[in-house]
Image (cartoon, rainbow, N blue to C red):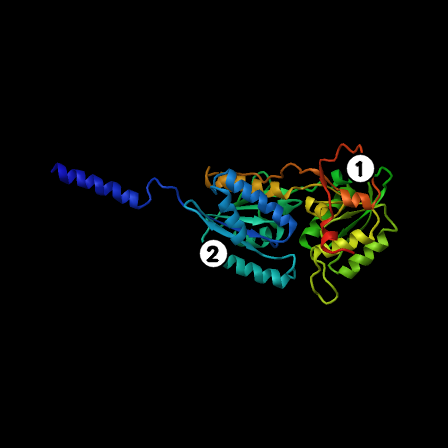
């Protein structure tokens, strides 16, 4: 009788162990980037995501991070994470984005994730609106201006649905302020941007601040175009009218045959032909060769998104009640080569927090 009892207890515990009792569930996370691997901003956000995956114990070591970065997927005993790229900087037509969105949604459904992460505006808009109020929690990063604009949140402080995340407030006033500290005589500026989702959002935010009297320089004109030829002509025309530029995105520019222009090639042309100083929005453009930015850090965007994913998956916090956040700014960054091209003396400019030595655009496309 005692033998039968002992054997029954053994079978009982064997059953629960075989069902994974006491074992950690293997989580599944699907990551969607709006853009492509070569885009500097996407590289910056990816570094932040990877740092978060390590710090919050989703991944265990650097080798797993390297495998994820190389293959867009890694599987460990505790996690399967997969990343896909929508490539909407190059495939920016509405019909192209719609086709990519359908394909991406099919990939997500087949993957059956425990959580979806959406990088930047197009992924947030197109994928967020397909999976809102589903059973899958969603965390976004890199939404420009306000996360309210896509109809996914009831409010920033109380999202009210299965989605929350991290947004970019944009340090436009601050960038112009520090540009004036470099060159105190500046009075006017123009906005130069492509006509992309990102470009429009950032330009609109700058215009709104100008209308509210929150900018230290007078905004004279705004250029939004996807024509490289028009972009060039307007930049040349406006440098005779304004003291400075605010260069926003130039990643969806196309030639007269509709072919995409490499943004570094556009940047190289600008740096070689425009002799006025410029502020810009992110560190990536200072790496390209633009003069100054108060960085709206891509690294912090990605890192904070993983922090929120950790709160949802490990701490069981409902995203509906988790406020959307904007991280603190990144460094005040200067491109030393561009400063030299413009004859700007950087001595005793103690407010500068980070220097970029070379203009990547000119190294890639010498003029």
Nearer to us in this view, 337 or 109: 337
Above or below — where is 229 with respect to 295?
Answer: below
Nearer to us in this view, 156 or 21: 21
Q: Nearer the viewer, mark 2 or mark 1?
A: 1
Left or right: 3 as drawn, with respect to 298: left
Position of the N terminus by quadrant:
top left
How dense is the environment of label 1, judged by Cα within 10 Å: few (below 14), some, or many (20 and up)?
Answer: few
Disc number placed over residue 346 in the picture, else none: 1
Per the image, label 2 sits on a secondary structure element best described as: helix
Nearer to us in this view, 307 or 101: 307
Left or right: 136 as drawn, with respect to 262: left
* Residue at the spot 54% in from the left edge and 50% down from the top edge: 69
Location of mark 2 (residue): 109
Q: Quadrant of residue 330?
A: top right
Q: Position of residue 342 (x, y in %)?
A: 83, 45
Above or below — where is 105 with respect to 61?
Answer: below
* Residue at the spot 52% in from the left edge and 54% down from the top edge: 71
* Residue at the spot 59% in from the left edge and 61% down from the top edge: 98
Q: CA distance from mark 2 to mark 1?
A: 53 Å
Q: Position of residue 24 (x, y in %)?
A: 39, 41
Q: Are marks 2 and 1 in contact (CB under 8 Å)?
A: no
Q: Is residue 137 visible?
A: no
Disc number placed over residue 113 in the picture, else none: none
Q: Earlier in the sequence, mark 2 or mark 1?
A: 2
* Residue at the spot 87% in from the left edge and 39% down from the top edge: 185
Q: Is residue 353 visible?
A: yes
Per the image, label 1 sits on a secondary structure element best described as: loop
């Amino acid at each position: 009788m005692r033998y039968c009892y002992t054997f029954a207890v053994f079978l009982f515990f064997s059953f629960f162990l075989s069902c994974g009792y006491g074992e950690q569930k293997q989580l599944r996370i699907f990551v969607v980037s709006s853009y492509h691997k070569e885009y500097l901003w996407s590289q910056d956000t990816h570094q932040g995501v990877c740092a978060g995956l390590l710090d919050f114990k989703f991944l265990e070591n650097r080798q797993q991070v390297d495998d994820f970065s190389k293959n867009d997927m890694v599987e460990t005993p505790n996690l399967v994470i997969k990343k896909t790229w929508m490539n909407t900087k190059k495939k920016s037509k509405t019909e192209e984005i719609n086709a990519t969105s359908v394909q991406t949604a099919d990939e997500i459904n087949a993957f059956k994730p425990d959580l979806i992460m959406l990088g930047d505006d197009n992924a947030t808009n197109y994928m967020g609106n397909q999976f809102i109020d589903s059973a899958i929690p969603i965390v976004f990063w890199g939404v420009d201006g306000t996360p309210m604009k896509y109809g996914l949140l009831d409010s920033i402080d109380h999202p009210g649905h299965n989605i929350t995340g991290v947004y970019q407030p944009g340090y436009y006033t601050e960038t112009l302020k520090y540009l004036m500290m470099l060159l105190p005589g500046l009075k006017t500026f123009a906005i130069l941007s492509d006509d992309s989702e990102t470009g429009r959002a950032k330009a609109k935010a700058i215009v709104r601040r100008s209308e509210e009297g929150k900018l230290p320089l007078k905004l004279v004109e705004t250029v939004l175009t996807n024509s490289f030829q028009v972009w060039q002509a307007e930049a040349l025309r406006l440098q005779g009218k304004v003291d400075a530029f605010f260069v926003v995105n130039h990643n969806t520019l196309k030639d007269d045959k509709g072919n995409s222009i490499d943004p570094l090639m556009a940047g190289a042309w600008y740096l070689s032909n425009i002799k006025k100083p410029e502020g810009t929005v992110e560190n990536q453009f200072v790496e390209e060769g633009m003069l100054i930015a108060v960085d709206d850090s891509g690294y912090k965007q990605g890192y904070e998104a993983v922090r929120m994913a950790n709160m949802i998956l490990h701490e069981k916090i409902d995203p509906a009640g988790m406020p959307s956040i904007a991280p603190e700014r990144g460094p005040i960054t200067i491109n030393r080569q561009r400063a030299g091209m413009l004859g700007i003396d950087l001595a005793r400019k103690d407010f500068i927090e980070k220097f970029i030595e070379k203009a990547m655009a000119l190294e890639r496309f010498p003029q």
